[in-house]
Amino acid sequence: MPIMSINASTSDMRDVSSSRQDKARQAGTALYGSIHNQAVEPRMENESYTYVYGPERISTHRYSPCSTVSSVRRTFCLIALFDLCFCFILWVIYTQLTGSETVWEAFEQQVANYQFQTSLFDTVMVAALRFILIELGYALFRLNHWWLIAISTSLTCIFLITKVFLFEFSHDGKAENPLSYILLLTSFILTWIETWFLDFKVLPTEKKILLRGTHGEANERSGLLGRAEEGGNRVVHDDDKDRYYSPAGSDDEGEDRYRSLPPSRSHSRKASQSSINSLLGSQDHEYLKIANETMDMLFELVREGGWITERESQGDMVQSAYIKKLKRKIFKLECTLDISPHELWKDTIDNVNDSPSWNPTLLESKTLLVVDEKTDISYNIAAEAAGGLVSARDFINLRHWGERDQTFFIAVNKATFPDMPPQKKYVRGESGPCGLVFNRVTGQPNRCKLQWFLNTNLKGWIPQAVIDQGLTGVLMDYCKYLRQHIQEIKGRSFS
C-alpha cells in the first residue's frame, strides 16, 4: 500500500492553530456582542487593548478605539460649558447696570474701549480660555492627568487676585455695581469646582473602571476571548481562573450576588514563585507592598509595651494601648489554647470562608481574590455588638501570612476592591495594621498562645466608651467560640 506523507513544518502547524484560535475568539466576541446588543470589535493579533463591556467603557490608550467617553467625564465637560455660559450671562447683566444709555454703548465701553481697571470682559475671556483648554485636553485628547486643570486654575487665580486689587469698583462718579463682586466670585468658585470634580470624581472613577476592565472581567469568557493585557498571546493558566470571584449579578439576586472562590483553590497557592510573578499586575504588587508593611507593623505591636488590662476571665485577657505611630487605640487578646500553633494557623488560613459557621460574631466571610500563595483579599461582615449599640459592619481586608522568628502570623490590613462597593445594609468599616500571632508554649508543643491585635475604625458617630465595650466583648466571645471550634477540629482528626 502506498504511503502518503505530508511535509508540514512545525511553524506551519502553529500558524494553522493560531489562525483557528483567532477565528474562535472572533466568533465568541461576535456571539457575546449579539446577545447583549453591544458592538464589540474582535482583538487583532498585535493589539494591546482590554475588553470592557457595558456602559462604563472609557476611552484610554489601553482600550479599543470603539470606546466612548465615560459619563463622569462628559459631566465634567458640561460643567466647563456651564462655567463659560454663566459668566457670559452675568457679564451681560452687569453691562446693563453700568449706567450707559444703550446696550451697544455699554458693550463698546467694555470691549472696544477695554481697560483692565474698569472692564470685566476679561473675566469672560478667561472663562472661554478655561473652556477651550478643558475641551481640548479632556474631551478631544482625553488626558488622564491633572496637570492641565492645575495650569488653568493657577492662571485664573493669579488673574482674579490681580483684578481684585486693581479694578475700580466705583469710577467716574458712578455707584458701585454689585454684580462686579458676584462675577469675580463666581469665576473663582466655578474654577475650583472644576478642579475638585476632575481630581476627586473623574480620575478616581475612571481608574476604578480601568481596574474592573483588567481584573473584574476575568470570568467564564476569558478562555474564549483570549484576554492579552500584556500584548501578544497570553497563555491562560488553569490556576489563573481561580484568582477571581464571580462578578456581580443582577439586583434581584439578593444576598447571593457575590460568590466566593471554589473550595479547590489550594493549588493556586502552591504555584511556583516565577509563575506567580508573571501573573501579578500593578494592583497585585501594590497589595504585596501593603502586606509587607503590615507584617512589619504587626511585629512592632508584638514588641510594644504599656498595655492596660480591660478585662480578664479564666486566663483570657483583653488589653489596650494607644499607639502613637497609628494614632489610635489598639486592643489585644491573649489566650492559651489546647492546639498546636501550626495547626490553628493553618485552619485559620484555609477555612476562613467557613468561620461564620462556628463564630457568631461573623455573619459572612468570603475570599474575593488570591493575590499569591501567602496573600489574599477577603470580605467580612461583623455582627452587631454592645447589645445592638454598634450595628453590623462589613470590611474588605488584605491577609498576609507566614512564619517569622519561629512564630506563625497572619497580618491584616484594609484593602480596596472595585468590584465590592459599599453595601446599603452595612456601614463599611476599616481595619488598620493588625493581625494574629500564634506563639509556641515552651515545653508544650500541643498548646498555642494566641495574640490577636485588633485595630479597627468602625466609622459613624459612636462614643469611645461604646466602642471599648463592644470590641472587648467581641474579643472575649471570639475566645470562647474558638475553644469550641478547637474541640470540633480535634474530633475530626480522631475520627
Image: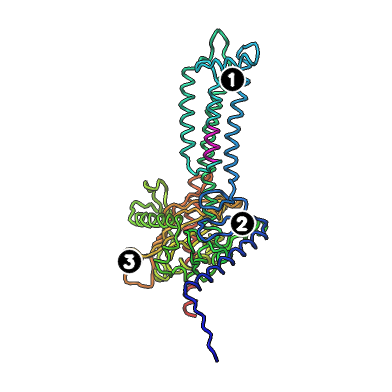
Residue 76 vs 216, above or below: the answer is above
Q: Is residue 130 visible?
A: yes
- For the image, the number of numbered tags is 3
Residue 171 vs 349, above or below: the answer is above
Residue 113 placement (x, y as % from top left): 54, 15
Residue 367 placement (x, y as % from top left): 52, 62
Q: Is residue 314 visible?
A: no
Is residue 50 part of the magenta span, yes or no?
no
Our reading of the magenta stretch's main secondary structure is helix
Residues shaded magenta: 130-138
On-image quarter of the N terminus: bottom right
Residue tagged by mark 1?
179
For label 2, the crowd category at 10 Å Cα-Cα, with few meaning under 14, some 14 to 19 and many 20 or more, is: some
Q: How much space separates mark 3 and mark 1, taking CA atoms? A: 74 Å
Q: In which quarter of the image is residue 51?
A: bottom right
The residue lying at 53 percent from left, 32 percent from top is 130
| Lower sequence index among marks 2 and 1 | 2
